[in-house]
Image: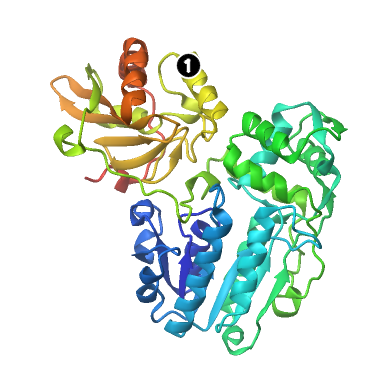
Amino acid sequence: MRVLVTGATGYVGGRLAPRLVHAGHRVRCLTRSPGKLRDVPWAKEVEIVEGDVTDAESLYAAFKGVEIVYYLVHSLGRRDFEELDRAAALNVAAAAAAAGVRRIVYLGGPDPDDNAGSAHLRSRHEVARILLEGEVPAVVLRAPVIIGSGSASFEMLRHLTERLPIMITPKWVHNRIQPIAIRDVLRYLVFMASDDDWPAREVNRAFDICGPDVLTYAEMMQRYARVARLPRRVILPTRFLSPTLSAHWVGVVTPVPNAIARPLVASLIHDATGHEHDIATYVPDPPEGLTGFDRAVALALAKIRDSDVETRWSGATWPGAMAAEPLPTDPEWSGGTLYTDNRQRPVATSPERLWRVIEAIGGENGWYSFPLAWSVRGWLDRLVGGVGLRRGRRDPHRLYVGEALDFWRVEEIVPGELLRLRAEMRLPGRAWLEMWVEPGPNGARYRQRAVFLPHGLAGHLYWAAVWPFHAVIFGGMARNIARTAERTAGAPLPAYPADRLRR
């Protein structure tokens, strides 16, 4: 099949695309930021095109010659996500019809009896309706909570359970949920293109896809604790925690920021279970059955433990999001002051060894200077609705362009030479951090540059306020990165693909 995957930089799309390739299909990926797919292992096996589902004109060429369109985008995290999702669905339906697409496959959310209280579910339901009423037959797969390494729902469950042995919880923790493993979601999605009979059938309807276990959220936390070998959690429900307060609490305790936690929590105030299993008529259950909750958790934890997480919720590019502007290189061109903090140090080790330390920065490895200051900055960012430091990193050794790294985003990598990070914390301006490796007379030379482009008076005041701490933060960072590279000079290097050091 000739298939198009929208949302290929997202959690599900980033896993679906390589599986479709493996199944023998010709895959085209539509993304607002093609650079974010540059370093993924399957990039050379797909066609990557630039486009935005909220920009109708960008879709027609992308949809040309395609038989199946996978619609996997959702503007979660935006205040106006309902409006954006409505416009995007209308654009996709029109472009698919104009291009002669044979089928649209949409991954939506559960359809409870009364979804008026959740804008998140209401939007998903509206998108499904728009696609089902369009000219192109559509298959809508309605999935509740998805359990898999790196999913926002799983990260929320994991951190709440691991960090809170005693929990005062809202009453929605006793609502029923029928979670599904990410492997089963992907199996259904791949089947939509792998069976030659599907495009010929006039199937235009929604299907519930759920796992075999019906649990409350409280039971999910207890079962997670058991699989993770944690003591049983003490859960004390109360009627006084509203969804809004719950979302704020999730934002404080877990890596999921308020903007994402709010719609996720709002969707949990309803039962999220399947009303039918008609999908089995077209996609028979595997002989061993669908993946149960405990096994899904165990598989996800094994992926995290083995640093084998394919995609994470934090890597998604949401439709309608502000496009990232490149690092200004000329203060006159940028229209004003460009503040910089430059550091460099000789390092008595090989450039390759120094690069390994740089690319492993952040996450569990930290930022090599004044951990308390970084933690406080992360907490302050969370308090004002930012992402904070808890997003961590997907892999302890390797980074790709477009990945989230704590409260930074990887903007550019030249393996063995340059790592450029763009700040995603709340700031009165834009900020970048660059780390360079150069050959030196006695090994290597490390160069570091922090860049800040202020917005208005607040931006200038911010830089003046933090300037006294730069010697401690950035000076210590340069010093400790160099020392770490020198101290580990005799240690074996971690497994590393050869092409990651090719210039």
> Which residue sits at x=25%, y=22%?
349
Report the residue at 21% width, 27% height from top.
337
For the view shown, which residue lies furthest in the front direction? 457
Instruction: For the C terminus, give its image quadrant.
Output: top left
Residue 60 in the image: x percent, y percent? 38, 76
Secondary element type, mark 1: helix
How far across and down, in percent of the image, does residue 25 sit? 46, 75
Residue closer to the observer: 278 or 21: 278
Q: Residue at x 34, y 29 (%)?
A: 358
Colour basis: rainbow
Q: Is residue 100 above or below residue 479?
A: below
Residue 257, given in percent of the width and then of the height, sits at: 58, 37
Q: Considering depth in this image, is 217 or 39 the residue closer to the camera?
A: 217
Is any atom of residue 43 visible in this view?
A: yes
226 to the left or right of 414: right
User: Viewed as shown, does residue 420 lie left or right of 265?
Assistant: left
The quadrant where residue 328 appears: top left
Check the image and report above or below for 113 versus 11.
Answer: below
Q: Position of residue 233 (x, y in %)?
A: 82, 30
For mark 1, what is the residue?
A: 371
